[in-house]
Image: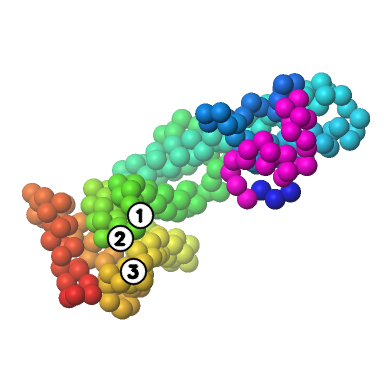
Protein backbone atom coordinates (compact mmCIF):
# COMPACT_ATOMS: atom_id res chain seq x y z
CA UNK A 1 0.00 0.00 0.00
CA UNK A 2 1.83 3.08 -1.21
CA UNK A 3 1.26 6.37 0.64
CA UNK A 4 2.97 9.12 -1.30
CA UNK A 5 0.59 12.01 -0.58
CA UNK A 6 -0.73 13.66 2.55
CA UNK A 7 -4.39 13.76 1.43
CA UNK A 8 -6.34 11.49 -0.90
CA UNK A 9 -9.74 11.59 -2.53
CA UNK A 10 -12.19 8.78 -1.76
CA UNK A 11 -11.42 7.01 -5.03
CA UNK A 12 -7.66 7.27 -4.42
CA UNK A 13 -8.03 5.98 -0.86
CA UNK A 14 -10.04 3.06 -2.21
CA UNK A 15 -7.28 2.18 -4.68
CA UNK A 16 -4.47 2.59 -2.12
CA UNK A 17 -6.22 0.66 0.65
CA UNK A 18 -7.95 -2.02 -1.41
CA UNK A 19 -11.32 -1.24 0.24
CA UNK A 20 -14.35 -0.41 -1.95
CA UNK A 21 -15.68 3.15 -1.68
CA UNK A 22 -19.00 1.83 -0.36
CA UNK A 23 -17.22 -0.01 2.47
CA UNK A 24 -15.21 3.09 3.42
CA UNK A 25 -18.43 5.14 3.52
CA UNK A 26 -20.06 2.44 5.67
CA UNK A 27 -17.17 2.54 8.15
CA UNK A 28 -17.48 6.33 8.35
CA UNK A 29 -21.22 6.11 9.08
CA UNK A 30 -20.61 3.42 11.72
CA UNK A 31 -17.93 5.53 13.42
CA UNK A 32 -15.02 3.19 12.68
CA UNK A 33 -13.41 5.91 10.58
CA UNK A 34 -13.43 9.66 11.34
CA UNK A 35 -15.27 12.06 9.07
CA UNK A 36 -13.05 13.36 6.24
CA UNK A 37 -12.11 16.99 5.63
CA UNK A 38 -14.46 18.83 3.28
CA UNK A 39 -12.95 21.21 0.72
CA UNK A 40 -15.91 22.56 -1.22
CA UNK A 41 -17.69 19.56 -2.71
CA UNK A 42 -14.66 17.30 -2.30
CA UNK A 43 -13.90 15.09 0.69
CA UNK A 44 -10.21 14.66 1.48
CA UNK A 45 -8.79 11.80 3.53
CA UNK A 46 -5.53 11.93 5.49
CA UNK A 47 -3.63 9.09 3.81
CA UNK A 48 -1.68 7.94 6.87
CA UNK A 49 -4.62 8.12 9.30
CA UNK A 50 -7.14 6.32 7.09
CA UNK A 51 -4.88 3.64 5.64
CA UNK A 52 -3.59 2.73 9.12
CA UNK A 53 -7.15 2.57 10.46
CA UNK A 54 -8.27 0.42 7.55
CA UNK A 55 -5.36 -1.96 8.16
CA UNK A 56 -6.51 -2.37 11.78
CA UNK A 57 -10.12 -2.91 10.73
CA UNK A 58 -9.02 -5.58 8.26
CA UNK A 59 -6.91 -7.26 10.96
CA UNK A 60 -9.72 -7.33 13.53
CA UNK A 61 -12.34 -8.37 10.98
CA UNK A 62 -10.06 -11.28 10.13
CA UNK A 63 -10.43 -12.38 13.75
CA UNK A 64 -14.22 -12.65 13.22
CA UNK A 65 -15.03 -9.62 15.37
CA UNK A 66 -18.23 -7.68 14.78
CA UNK A 67 -18.09 -4.07 13.59
CA UNK A 68 -19.23 -2.93 17.04
CA UNK A 69 -16.40 -4.85 18.70
CA UNK A 70 -13.91 -3.45 16.18
CA UNK A 71 -15.18 0.06 16.91
CA UNK A 72 -14.72 -0.45 20.67
CA UNK A 73 -11.14 -1.65 20.16
CA UNK A 74 -10.33 1.27 17.85
CA UNK A 75 -11.74 3.73 20.39
CA UNK A 76 -9.59 2.18 23.13
CA UNK A 77 -6.51 2.44 20.91
CA UNK A 78 -7.28 6.10 20.14
CA UNK A 79 -7.88 6.89 23.83
CA UNK A 80 -4.54 5.32 24.76
CA UNK A 81 -2.76 7.14 21.94
CA UNK A 82 -4.19 10.50 23.06
CA UNK A 83 -3.23 9.74 26.65
CA UNK A 84 0.34 8.94 25.61
CA UNK A 85 0.55 12.13 23.54
CA UNK A 86 -0.66 14.20 26.49
CA UNK A 87 1.79 12.46 28.83
CA UNK A 88 4.62 13.14 26.39
CA UNK A 89 3.67 16.82 26.21
CA UNK A 90 3.58 17.08 30.01
CA UNK A 91 6.95 15.34 30.21
CA UNK A 92 8.45 17.70 27.61
CA UNK A 93 7.06 20.73 29.47
CA UNK A 94 8.59 19.52 32.75
CA UNK A 95 11.93 18.91 31.04
CA UNK A 96 11.88 22.37 29.44
CA UNK A 97 11.08 23.98 32.79
CA UNK A 98 13.93 22.14 34.52
CA UNK A 99 16.34 23.40 31.85
CA UNK A 100 15.03 26.97 32.01
CA UNK A 101 15.20 27.08 35.82
CA UNK A 102 18.64 25.44 35.82
CA UNK A 103 20.10 28.06 33.47
CA UNK A 104 19.04 30.85 35.83
CA UNK A 105 20.33 28.90 38.84
CA UNK A 106 23.71 28.10 37.26
CA UNK A 107 24.15 31.75 36.27
CA UNK A 108 23.27 32.86 39.80
CA UNK A 109 25.26 30.35 41.87
CA UNK A 110 27.76 28.86 39.43
CA UNK A 111 28.05 25.22 38.42
CA UNK A 112 29.99 23.90 41.41
CA UNK A 113 27.80 25.55 44.06
CA UNK A 114 24.53 24.48 42.47
CA UNK A 115 23.27 21.24 44.02
CA UNK A 116 20.65 18.72 42.96
CA UNK A 117 18.57 19.95 45.89
CA UNK A 118 18.75 23.50 44.49
CA UNK A 119 17.67 22.28 41.07
CA UNK A 120 14.68 20.24 42.23
CA UNK A 121 13.54 22.99 44.59
CA UNK A 122 13.83 25.61 41.86
CA UNK A 123 11.59 23.59 39.53
CA UNK A 124 9.32 22.37 42.36
CA UNK A 125 9.83 18.71 41.47
CA UNK A 126 10.98 15.58 43.27
CA UNK A 127 14.36 13.94 42.83
CA UNK A 128 12.77 11.00 41.03
CA UNK A 129 11.35 13.39 38.42
CA UNK A 130 14.75 15.02 38.00
CA UNK A 131 16.51 11.69 37.44
CA UNK A 132 13.80 10.59 35.05
CA UNK A 133 14.91 13.38 32.70
CA UNK A 134 18.62 13.75 33.48
CA UNK A 135 21.30 11.30 34.55
CA UNK A 136 23.05 13.84 36.79
CA UNK A 137 23.88 17.54 37.18
CA UNK A 138 26.51 17.42 34.44
CA UNK A 139 24.00 15.99 31.94
CA UNK A 140 21.58 18.81 32.76
CA UNK A 141 24.35 21.40 32.45
CA UNK A 142 25.29 20.05 29.00
CA UNK A 143 21.64 20.18 27.94
CA UNK A 144 21.41 23.80 29.12
CA UNK A 145 24.36 24.76 26.90
CA UNK A 146 22.82 22.97 23.91
CA UNK A 147 19.37 24.43 24.56
CA UNK A 148 20.64 28.03 24.67
CA UNK A 149 22.32 27.79 21.27
CA UNK A 150 19.37 25.99 19.66
CA UNK A 151 16.93 28.61 21.01
CA UNK A 152 19.08 31.45 19.66
CA UNK A 153 19.25 29.86 16.21
CA UNK A 154 15.49 29.22 16.14
CA UNK A 155 14.66 32.70 17.41
CA UNK A 156 16.82 34.33 14.76
CA UNK A 157 15.61 32.09 11.94
CA UNK A 158 11.90 32.49 12.68
CA UNK A 159 12.21 36.23 12.01
CA UNK A 160 13.08 35.45 8.38
CA UNK A 161 10.22 33.76 6.47
CA UNK A 162 12.38 33.42 3.36
CA UNK A 163 14.86 30.71 4.36
CA UNK A 164 16.92 31.39 1.23
CA UNK A 165 17.74 34.92 2.44
CA UNK A 166 21.08 33.92 3.94
CA UNK A 167 22.33 37.42 4.70
CA UNK A 168 19.19 38.35 6.62
CA UNK A 169 19.32 35.09 8.59
CA UNK A 170 22.94 35.83 9.55
CA UNK A 171 21.93 39.33 10.60
CA UNK A 172 18.96 38.20 12.71
CA UNK A 173 20.95 35.42 14.36
CA UNK A 174 23.69 37.89 15.24
CA UNK A 175 21.19 40.30 16.80
CA UNK A 176 19.66 37.44 18.79
CA UNK A 177 23.11 36.43 20.05
CA UNK A 178 23.66 39.98 21.31
CA UNK A 179 20.31 40.07 23.09
CA UNK A 180 20.89 36.67 24.72
CA UNK A 181 24.54 37.26 25.62
CA UNK A 182 23.92 37.18 29.39
CA UNK A 183 22.69 33.59 29.14
CA UNK A 184 25.00 32.04 26.57
CA UNK A 185 28.07 34.10 27.50
CA UNK A 186 27.62 33.34 31.19
CA UNK A 187 27.05 29.63 30.60
CA UNK A 188 30.06 29.36 28.28
CA UNK A 189 32.24 31.02 30.93
CA UNK A 190 31.01 28.51 33.51
CA UNK A 191 31.71 25.69 31.07
CA UNK A 192 35.26 26.91 30.39
CA UNK A 193 35.90 27.09 34.13
CA UNK A 194 34.57 23.54 34.50
CA UNK A 195 36.91 22.34 31.73
CA UNK A 196 39.89 23.88 33.54
CA UNK A 197 38.99 22.11 36.80
CA UNK A 198 38.01 18.80 35.17
CA UNK A 199 39.04 18.58 31.49
CA UNK A 200 38.20 14.89 31.12
CA UNK A 201 34.65 15.38 32.36
CA UNK A 202 33.74 18.57 30.49
CA UNK A 203 35.85 18.78 27.31
CA UNK A 204 33.24 16.99 25.20
CA UNK A 205 30.50 19.31 26.45
CA UNK A 206 32.56 22.36 25.46
CA UNK A 207 33.27 20.84 22.06
CA UNK A 208 29.57 20.16 21.44
CA UNK A 209 28.63 23.70 22.45
CA UNK A 210 31.20 25.27 20.14
CA UNK A 211 30.27 22.99 17.25
CA UNK A 212 26.59 23.91 17.53
CA UNK A 213 27.43 27.52 16.67
CA UNK A 214 30.20 26.74 14.19
CA UNK A 215 28.31 24.08 12.23
CA UNK A 216 25.11 26.13 11.91
CA UNK A 217 27.08 29.19 10.76
CA UNK A 218 29.11 27.05 8.39
CA UNK A 219 25.91 25.72 6.77
CA UNK A 220 24.76 29.26 5.98
CA UNK A 221 28.14 30.27 4.58
CA UNK A 222 28.26 27.15 2.42
CA UNK A 223 24.78 27.96 1.09
CA UNK A 224 26.00 31.46 0.26
CA UNK A 225 28.95 30.05 -1.69
CA UNK A 226 26.71 27.61 -3.57
CA UNK A 227 24.22 30.37 -4.45
CA UNK A 228 27.03 32.58 -5.74
CA UNK A 229 26.63 35.23 -3.03
CA UNK A 230 30.15 34.64 -1.69
CA UNK A 231 33.40 33.72 -3.36
CA UNK A 232 35.12 30.46 -2.40
CA UNK A 233 36.78 30.50 1.04
CA UNK A 234 37.33 28.29 4.08
CA UNK A 235 33.87 28.55 5.64
CA UNK A 236 34.76 26.47 8.71
CA UNK A 237 37.69 28.75 9.55
CA UNK A 238 35.53 31.84 9.10
CA UNK A 239 32.78 30.32 11.30
CA UNK A 240 35.32 29.83 14.10
CA UNK A 241 36.61 33.38 13.68
CA UNK A 242 33.07 34.77 13.67
CA UNK A 243 32.25 33.02 16.94
CA UNK A 244 35.30 34.50 18.62
CA UNK A 245 34.61 37.96 17.21
CA UNK A 246 30.94 37.78 18.19
CA UNK A 247 31.67 36.81 21.77
CA UNK A 248 34.28 39.56 22.16
CA UNK A 249 31.90 42.13 20.64
CA UNK A 250 29.09 41.01 22.93
CA UNK A 251 31.34 41.35 25.97
CA UNK A 252 32.75 44.72 24.93
CA UNK A 253 29.40 46.31 24.10
CA UNK A 254 27.67 44.90 27.19
CA UNK A 255 30.42 45.77 29.68
CA UNK A 256 32.45 48.67 28.25
CA UNK A 257 30.60 50.71 25.64
CA UNK A 258 27.04 50.05 26.75
CA UNK A 259 25.19 52.87 24.98
CA UNK A 260 25.17 51.32 21.54
CA UNK A 261 22.50 50.73 18.92
CA UNK A 262 22.81 46.99 18.30
CA UNK A 263 20.95 47.21 14.99
CA UNK A 264 23.27 49.90 13.62
CA UNK A 265 26.36 48.11 14.94
CA UNK A 266 25.33 44.82 13.32
CA UNK A 267 24.58 46.62 10.06
CA UNK A 268 28.10 48.06 10.04
CA UNK A 269 29.55 44.70 11.04
CA UNK A 270 27.73 42.96 8.19
CA UNK A 271 29.18 45.46 5.71
CA UNK A 272 32.69 44.81 7.03
CA UNK A 273 32.02 41.08 6.95
CA UNK A 274 30.77 41.13 3.36
CA UNK A 275 33.55 43.37 2.09
CA UNK A 276 35.98 40.49 2.33
CA UNK A 277 33.86 37.64 1.00
CA UNK A 278 31.13 38.90 -1.32
CA UNK A 279 31.59 38.17 -4.99
CA UNK A 280 31.96 41.81 -5.97
CA UNK A 281 34.38 42.66 -3.15
Which of pointers 3 and 1 lies earlier in the amino acid sequence?
1
Residue that extends furthest to the right in the rendered view of this protein? 64
Q: Is residue 166 left or right of residue 248?
A: right
The residue beneath circle 1 is 163
Tell me the quarter of the image containing the C terminus: bottom left
SS assignment at label 2: helix
What residue is rendered at 43% in x and 42% in y?
A: 99
The answer for how far apart the CA atoms under marks 2 and 3 are is 10 Å
Q: Residues within 10 Å of mark 1 (few under 14, many from 20)?
A: few
Q: Residues within 10 Å of mark 3 (few under 14, many from 20)?
A: few
Q: Is residue 108 left or right of residue 18?
A: left
Q: For residue 229, which quarter of the picture?
A: bottom left
The answer for how far apart the CA atoms under marks 3 and 1 are is 13 Å
Q: For residue 243, which quarter of the picture?
A: bottom left
Q: Which mark is residue 227?
A: 3
- The answer to whether residue 11 is above or below residue 274 is above
Does the magenta run of residues contain 16? yes
x, y (%) of residue 262? 15, 51
Foreground residue, 157 or 66?
66
| Circles 3, 1 touching at the beta carbon (< 8 Å) | no
Label 2 or label 3, whichever lies nearer to me, is: 3
What residue is rendered at 46% in x and 30% in y?
A: 124
Does the magenta run of residues contain 252? no
What range of the chain is rendered magenta?
4-27
Q: Is residue 197 visible?
A: no
SS assignment at label 1: loop
The residue beneath circle 2 is 166
What residue is rendered at 47% in x and 42% in y?
A: 116
- The answer to whether residue 131 is above or below residue 80 is below
Q: Is residue 63 left or right of residue 37?
A: right
Q: Is residue 208 visible?
A: yes
Amino acid sequence: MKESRKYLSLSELSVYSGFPETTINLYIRKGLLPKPIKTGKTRMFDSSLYTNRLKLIKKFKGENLSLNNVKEILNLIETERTKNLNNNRVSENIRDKIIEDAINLFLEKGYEKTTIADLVNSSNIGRSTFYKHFKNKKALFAECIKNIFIDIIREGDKQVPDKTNILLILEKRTLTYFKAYREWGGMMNLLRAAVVSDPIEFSDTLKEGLLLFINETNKLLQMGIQKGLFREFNSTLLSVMLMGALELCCYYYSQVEKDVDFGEMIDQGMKLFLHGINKEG
